Amino acid sequence: MSPLAFPDVERLVVDHLRDRPELTGVTVDNRPPAGFDGTQRTVLVSRVGGAWVDDLHLDRPLVDLEVYGPDKTAAHTVALAARAALLQAAGTVYGSAAVTEVVEADGPRWLPEYNRPNANRYLSTVRLSIRPAS
């Protein structure tokens, strides 16, 4: 049997969200842009857990979306747009891997950002099911 080829889940999510028209003008990446202070319209993507499920032959990563905006209302609007866009990722093929399911684990919630006092942040978590190439 050949080794599994796991995709970069953060890059998969970033690439999916970057191309969405409802996120035009929003920075989407897995690291903050230069000069980031938490007031820019930004979605930061991070894999925060999850595991390989051998019986199902699926990677089941947990992915956080940290969403920022110039004020609470704007951050919430971007969070809802990112949420809707990512929930539509099922069926996406990324390289030789396929996203088979996207399930919200925790919807957008307001979360103060203590390192950036002017920031407006919402955080949500999704669980993807990804069938890697083998």
Image (tube, helix red, strand yellow):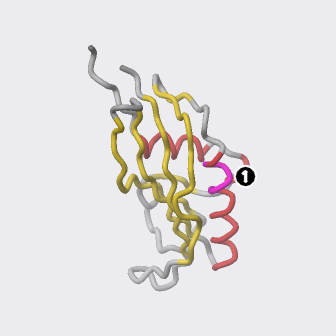
Q: Secondary structure at mark 1?
A: helix
Q: Amino acid at mark 1?
A: Glu
Instruction: Indicate whether residue 83 is drawn in magenta.
Output: yes
Query: Looking at the picture, how far across and down is residue 51, in whole percent?
Result: 34, 45
Q: Residue at x 41, y 32 (%)?
A: 56
Q: How many marks?
A: 1
**Which one is nearer the viewer's eye here, 96 or 2?**
2
Q: Which residues are magenta?
A: 82-86
Left or right, 34 with respect to 89, comes to: left
Left or right, 74 with respect to 37, comes to: right
Q: Is residue 15 above or below residue 95?
A: below
Judged by its main secondary structure, the magenta piece is helix
Left or right, 88 with respect to 111, comes to: right
Left or right, 128 with respect to 85, comes to: left
Query: Looking at the picture, how far across and down is residue 109, in whole percent?
Result: 56, 73
Query: Looking at the picture, how far across and down is residue 41, in whole percent?
Result: 60, 65
The residue singled out by tag 1 in the image is 22
Crowd around label 1: few <14 · some 14–19 · many ≥20 (10 Å): some
Q: Residue at x 45, y 53 (%)?
A: 63
**Which one is nearer the viewer's eye here, 2 or 71?**
2
Q: Residue furthest right?
A: 22
Q: Quadrant of the N terminus?
A: top left
